Image: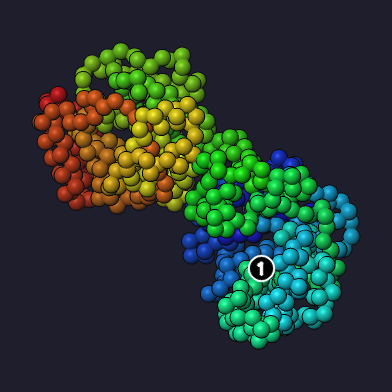
Amino acid sequence: MIFLSAQPDEVFFLWQLEVLLYNFKQVGIDPACIHILLGVDPRIGLKMEYKSLVARQDLAQFFIYPDNRENPKYVSGIRPHIIKQHFNKNPWLQQETLFYHDCDIIFRELPDMQEMEADNTWYVSDTKSYLDTKYILKHGTKVLDDMCSIVGIDKEQVIVNDENAGGAQYILKGTDYTFWNKVENDAEKLFTQLKDTKESYAIAYAQETGEEISAYAGIQAWCADMWAVLWNGLLSGNRVKISKELDFCWPINKIERWDECKIFHNAGIVGNQARKYFCKGSYEHKVPYFELFGYVDKTSCSTRYVEVMNNYIKSSKIVLKDTTILIPVRIDSPDRMNNLHTILRYIDTYFETNVIVLEIDDSPKVNREVIPPYVRYCFQYDERAIYYRTYYNNQLLNMCETPYAAIFDTDVVVPPNQLLWAVEYLRHMGMSLVYPFSGGCYFVDNNFSNLFRKQLDFGILNNYRDCFYETPVDGYGGVFVVNLDTFKRLGMENINLVGWGPEDQERYKRFKIAGEKIKRIEGPLYHLHHIRKENSNFHNNQLELSNRHEFLKVCNMSTAALQEYIHEMKSEGYQPPALRYI
């Protein structure tokens, strides 16, 4: 049996697929039998956010197909559109039994498929309440007549099958390119008809029933492909039967229903229900992994989906072995020490990667016994009061042996998926410099910083971020991810900027002048609380003037002038003029 789902390559479906595949692994489905079809814009190809998932052939078989539809009105029509391409490319699938499903399901346990695979009957979940002719006729007899006419099926054949008018989850046999092509065309026509003629249906309904036109609610046109699959199955001569094994529960069902069904379908939450149940619609453009879900009704099935999602997060580290996280630090307060320990725990919790910590001070303050074994710790003696960040960042960059580097301030964190996507843009999209946050920085107060240090729960920060001060302009500091070869070619950090200053803005400007590709990832940057001391401001007036002058000088350079300047700074024996002001 092939487990088949089809969807566009949008973030909304990405996280659902990740949870789905985690669940499929838990219930023991062979990855070779899982076909994940992704529809992509043929002009741009697979979206970057999907690259890591598609590379995981240990989870499923992934297939990429272009969305070649012209001006479609029915969004879900992409499903049969890419399924027909899959059958065209893999005609052997006609001989296979398919478990056709959406990506918003999970299994409590696998249904007993053995008997359902043994015959030629199609088996479906019970969706009579919103697919059978009784439901359709509530919206007027003309609606059913028009729908049957579009598909080319006799109305009586549909009515006779009412007790088995199912969908959502299907066990299908003997389908082919021709079948799915007709499903695609019929679904588009059904949806268009039901949406575009709603007013005329309302008038006919009022004449038929004597009710006010305003009482007409309209049929659920989004079910168009479900009717198209079901009715074309009947039209093809297949027997279709609802199976108790395919019963499913909804998020709003009481939790007892979870134990009565083997399938959970994470759909149907609308309006104010989102205050009580997990609502997938709230996460169309972001992942829900780092949120607080204490509001979810613990007596509902919705809480089971949240549990599976949380278990996935805890069990799935992000692999960034081609990246090194570089952390320069000077321990000038207990807060700074706590933040270093926090960021190292954050990395250990969410990532498989490389880490180098460079402590710069007159004596070591970091207790090496509490540094995790995967971290390379180095100490550099420097008795100067000033924290020469650009110079020591370059030392870290020279220690780096991976193609990509992420330089973190000791006090900042970003939701893990944002760092992954930043690296993906370096890997696959030709970017040279990526900021794994939108631009603003949230300054977390001491109390919430302490909560995060204890729990490493981004849900706390995300849920309460409106309570934190956010910088009003786009920032370039805190963390950035870079192609190391490109950065070395551009001179790495500008050592003419000594101490606190505009080094983050200068770096961005230098990449811009050089014509390199730069990208921002949507999402927050959180700055944990620490006491601010002398290295949180300009060291003295002379250095302030020197650093500002250096920044403006670089900003006004042409590409050619910048290259000459970089060559000068990289020359042997070069001494930054600003050092005389220390």
Q: Position of residue 44 (x, y in %)?
A: 48, 61
Q: Is residue 173 above or below residue 207?
A: above
Q: Position of residue 256 (x, y in %)?
A: 74, 44
What's the residue at 59%, 81% (across, down)? 213
Q: Is residue 390 above or below residue 111?
A: above
What's the residue at 84%, 74% (across, down)? 160
Q: On the image, which quarter does residue 574 sit in?
A: top left
Q: Is residue 175 left or right of residue 191?
A: right
Q: Amino acid at mark 1?
A: Cys
**Toward the viewer: 236 or 56?**
236
Q: Is residue 492 left or right of residue 452?
A: left
Residue 253 can be seen in this image: yes
Residue 12 can be seen in this image: no
Q: Position of residue 397 (x, y in %)?
A: 35, 31
Q: Is residue 380 left or right of residue 385?
A: right
**Toward the viewer: 102 or 204?**
204
Q: On the image, which quarter does residue 539 sit in?
A: top left
Q: Which residue is mark 1?
A: 223
